[in-house]
Amino acid sequence: MRPKIIAHRGASHLAPENTLAAFRLAAAMGVDGIEFDTLLTADGHLVVHHEYITDLHANANEVIPWCTLDQLRALDFGSWKDPRYAGEKIPTFAEALEACSPVDTIQVEFKSPLGANATTDQDAFAERILEEVESSGLADKIIVTSFNHGILSRVKKLSPCQRVGVLTLNSVDSYLAPPPALLQTLGIISGPEAQSMMENGLENSLPGGQQALRALVDLAQYATLNGDETSPVRWLIDRLWALTSDHPGENLFELLLCMASQHDLPSYLASLDFLPEVLSCQYNTCFRDRDLVQKVQATGVEVAPWPVDGVFDLQSILDMDPVTIVTNRPERLFQMLDPDFQMPEAAAALLADPSLAR
């Protein structure tokens, strides 16, 4: 039996991530589910975007929690990917759900409120999440996910039947290990080596600890932001922002200790005061303990590694027999599972003319 295929931020290799175009393309491909991220705007609307800052995926550098919905709607969230997607708007939560409604599973990551809506009142935020889910008419398809497991605990207490998914990062050292593009920028690996790492998987190609440490030290030597995701300063800011923004009111040291406690995921899950339906772990966590998937699934918790994209990584994860795989490359996974796979006609039409998705 093949694993369920969840399109991470939609069909995000082929269309701009977290947009209606990416969601509709993924649905037309025949995926089992779609994952997307939500943030609260300054005027209290839920919109779909991964980063709190828009500069990588829009034509302006704005901080979403400090913007109104109208301000964000004026931006172009498609041209960065391909001029054919020019004018793609940031979706609202309701619009994203409508675009994803043909699939069986919708994994929604709720990011903690910041800016005008900043709060450490997790009960209030959990209530808001449940209101949005229950009013959508798609509650039976939605899995509420978060890196903030305190919020998930409150969701479960308020609505025991609501399915939730615990999101986890890999270990602290690997989380702070620079990505291939950054290692190339720092001169530690060559361009072909970086390309190989990104295409074929990281398990057997990550640089050794001394090289990773050298790269981290070199970060301090860069004083400017290049507006590029390969910029060392931008990368480090993203790492720290991602850790702290999901846990407002907690300090960085406490968060790093929490990450360390997740090194043994079966024990960590047993320590929670609720049982999640899904554990969605960063995929290379599975390489640390190749029996992890079966250990967790034996407890009744579905394992959904994310985001698995390279051919080597996909095959390695497939060999572990998870219930679900979350990927930016659903088309690649379909082809690996069925060499005769052909892009469905509806998906091919959307690829040929993205305007059909609007």
Image (cartoon, rainbow, N blue to C red):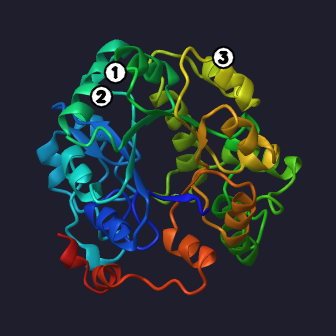
Looking at the image, do the residues carrying marks 1 and 2 touch, with CB atoms under 8 Å apart?
yes
Number of other residues with Cα within 10 Å of mark 1, as a class: few under 14, some 14 to 19, many 20 or more: many
Circle 1: residue type = Ala
Identify the element where label 1 is drawn: helix
Quick check: 225 above or below 251? below
Q: State the residue at coordinates (28%, 26%).
A: 130
- Residue 192, how many percent across, how many down? 73, 78
Q: Which residue position is annotated with label 3?
A: 271
Number of other residues with Cα within 10 Å of mark 3, as a class: few under 14, some 14 to 19, many 20 or more: few
Which of marks 1 and 3 precedes in the sequence? 1
Q: Which residue position is annotated with label 2?
A: 129
Circle 3: residue type = Ser
The answer to whether 172 appears left or right of 288 in the picture is left
37 or 194, nearer to the observer: 37
Total labels: the figure holds 3
The CA span between labels 3 and 2 is 24 Å
The CA span between labels 3 and 1 is 21 Å
On the rendered image, what quadrant is the N terminus found in?
A: bottom right
Identify the element where label 3 is drawn: helix
Q: Which residue position is annotated with label 1?
A: 126
